[in-house]
Amino acid sequence: MKLRLLMLWLVVTLPLVWGVYKTLLNAMKLFN
Amino acid sequence: MAESFLDRASTVAPPLFNRFLVPPAALAVHLSIGQAYAFSTFNLPLTKLIGITHQSPEDWGATEVGWTFSIAIAILGLSAALFGHWVERVGPRKAMFTAALCFGGGFIVAAVGLHFHALWMLYLGYGVLGGCGLGIGYISPVSTLIKWFPDRPGMATGMAIMGFGGGALIAAPLSVTLMDHFRTATSNGVVETFATMGVIYFFFMMVGVLSVRVPAPDWKPAGWTPSVKPQRLVTQSDVLVGQAWRTPQFWLLWGILCMNVSAGIGVLGQASPMIQEIFSGRVTPAAAAGFVGLLSLFNMAGRFFWAAASDYLGRRNTYLVFFLLGIVLYSTVPSVGRLGSIPLFVTAFAIIISMYGGGFATIPAYLRDMFGTLNVGAIHGRLLTAWAVAGVVGPQLFTYIRKFQIDQGVAKTQAYSVTMYIMCGLLFLGFLCDISMRPVAARFHFKPVGDAA
């Protein structure tokens, strides 16, 4: 059950982390 | 009749099931349908399907393409209202599966339409079919999460609805990456991108379909007992969807959502030109795009933060914060603009947009407090018509007032001042709705057969 929980959270959070990272890179242009 | 894998009865969780497996299932759906917020990345490429590098006379215009998003959002509101009761009846798995078929299939139909350059197929695919996927997908996990987290309903629904805000953060770079990948001398890559996204989103939503579970009817979190201390604005009774919309509380909540969304959505749509015009010559288009990105992050984070905070503050108090703090921030923006302080301006709008997102995410828990858990998903579906109305009113009001000001000879740097005060007015109306909230009268409460007094 714990492995399933970890896998499921990873599946949904990895794309989100990628999206947040890309957006943060874009947002940094505001401060340059 | 044989029981289907998709039926509600097949999704009842076994004993000792870990309830934290359910939020990622909801997130899988909301992160997918949140793509809608990033549809604007296709606006320009869709007007160059034939010309590839430039807009040819046979290509569609920006207005024609712009209708696709408007149709999708209108259908979102309509389908959430129409299918809310069905979603409650069949359970989250069948509803999520239907949403995956509609949303993924909508992309595929739209891709075929783009291939044949048939605008009606784009409207039908992304607008109508995709819009149904948006509406059904948006409401499908809400009541399930509320039932799994009776101790923290705001946090649970905030987590899912945060996914809708986060979906745009994924979809915008994904769309650009795919279009770059598929671009050739004879295609700008949009057709292939639509088809690929249809397949990706279908399978990603299936993660939610396969993992979602509903709690057994008598299930309660371990060690949790419902509060015996009566809270005035948290009911222990249920109100059916057919009764709920006859209550003044439903329309007060409709007004609260509509005003909160109207005040924020106009800013989101015009954020880039607004910051460039107010700080003319000091903010480049690239920096303005950064401002839009920053607002998207606060839109997403606010959904979780404010909804989770509402479990402690109370739902009415949370909206009071949105409206009062929003009025203070909007009314100071013109002064901040005159002062020329970009950091203060960005901070004010980051907080405003976090409360815009928070308004979406806190409303399911507010509905649960007022109407109980029995039909909360269906009632939420009907309430989302407020979003459809605000989606039209907010941006139109924002752009119309700005244009009127400029036509009257007001400098572009000052043209947003009146708009900000109008936004304060909308928030004040929302504030009035919120402070008018009272418990639902007992005559609207659902009485099970044999339980009548």
Image (cartoon, coloured by chain):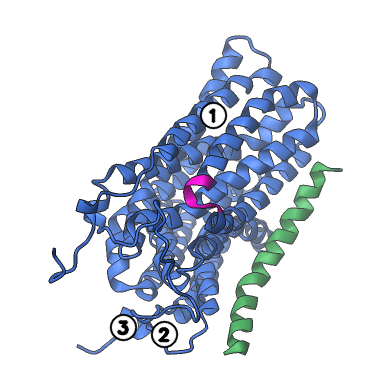
Indicate whether residue B428 is drawn in magenta. Answer: no
**In front: B58, or B124?**
B124
Tell me the amino acid under the disc marked 3.
Answer: Ala
Real-space Cα separation, disc 2 to disc 1, in angstroms: 45 Å
- Residue B399 position within the rendered picture, expressed as x and y whole percent measured from the top left: 54, 27
Image hue for chain B: blue
Can you identify the residue that label 2 sits on?
B13
Cα distance between the residues tagged 1 and 3: 47 Å
> What residue is disc 3 on?
B9
Mark 1 surroundings: few (<14), some (14-19) or many (≥20) residues within 10 A: many
Residue on which disc 1 sits:
B423
Residue displayed at 25% across by 49% down: B441
Residue B62 location (% of width, % of height): 53, 38
| The furthest residue to the right | A32
Residue B170 vs B24, above or below: the answer is above
- Residue B362 located left or right of residue B74: right
Q: Give the magenta-colored segment's residue range.
A: B313-317
